[in-house]
Image (cartoon, rainbow, N blue to C red):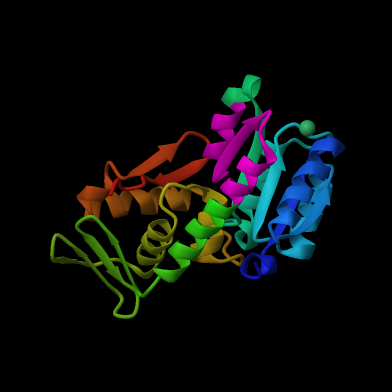
Amino acid sequence: MAPASSKKILVVEDERDILQLVKLYLEKDGYRVSTATTGPEGLKAVKAEHPDVLVLDLMLPDMDGLEVCKRLRADQQTATLPIIMLTAKAEESDTIIGLELGADDYVTKPFSPKALVARVKALLRRVERSREDAPSRSTYGALVLDRDRHEVKANGKDITLTAKEFGLLEYLLQHPGRVMTRDVLLNAVWGYEYYGTTRTIDVHVRRLKQKIPLLNDAIISIKSLGYKLKERET
Ligand code: CA
């Protein structure tokens, strides 16, 4: 079973029994596994090892999983790193926050290691699929964005966007269902050298909605965090 072996999974969990068990099962399935036991250690390991998936425990000493997740999402390099959160049933409200901060999936403790491995596998498949169909055209219902032609059409009609409006729309269309903080959007569309404020994002989102009415319900503002393009039901 060679194919999975190239994928690297980072597991951040302070309970060493769980950590070892998860590591064992993932390795048995052919994954390369590295581990960390605190939030800061986990952040460092992400930077150093570029894992394909991060399995992140919510309750960690020093810095909890929510903070780790938030920091990863705010950094353009790790903004789209696939993350599975490990949570306890009692932490349900934190789980919701975790998903809003951009975790891709979560598994509730106690869990079977096999089930976790299955979720890792499913997430990797999802990521792969979205990479495969990331061509020059993105569609969202009646909206079509063509990157090569620098064209946007809604219901067949041409929409004229500024370069930044185009970039912002493109970035949102590439990450449906994920909460993007204003900082992530600024970094992605304006770049690190930009000295504007995060309010710039609000202004551009408003303009996008004015020019493309179907985005009114599709781009959701997530209080004090940023924006999310609703996932379309297909
Ligand atoms: Ca823990």
Position of 152 with respect to 168 (left or right) is: left
Q: Position of residue 196 (x, y in %)?
A: 54, 57
Could you tell me residue 90's position as x and y percent? 64, 19
Residue 101 within the magenta-colored segment of the rendering: yes
The residue located at (39%, 50%) in the rendering is 203
Compared to 94, does 148 lie above or below?
A: below
Q: Position of residue 103 (x, y in %)?
A: 58, 44
Image quadrant occupied by the N terminus: bottom right
Height in image: 213 above or below 57? Answer: below
Residue in the image at 51% along x and 59% along y: 125
In the image, residue 127 lies in the stretch drawn in magenta: no
Tell me the residue at 29%/80% (across/down).
149
Q: What span is colored magenta in the figure?
A: 94-120
Which quadrant would residue 98 be assigned to in this image?
top right
**Quadrant holding ligand 1?**
top right
Q: Quadrant of residue 233?
A: top left
Q: Is residue 227 left or right of residue 31?
A: left
Res 197 seen here: no
Number of marks drawn: 0
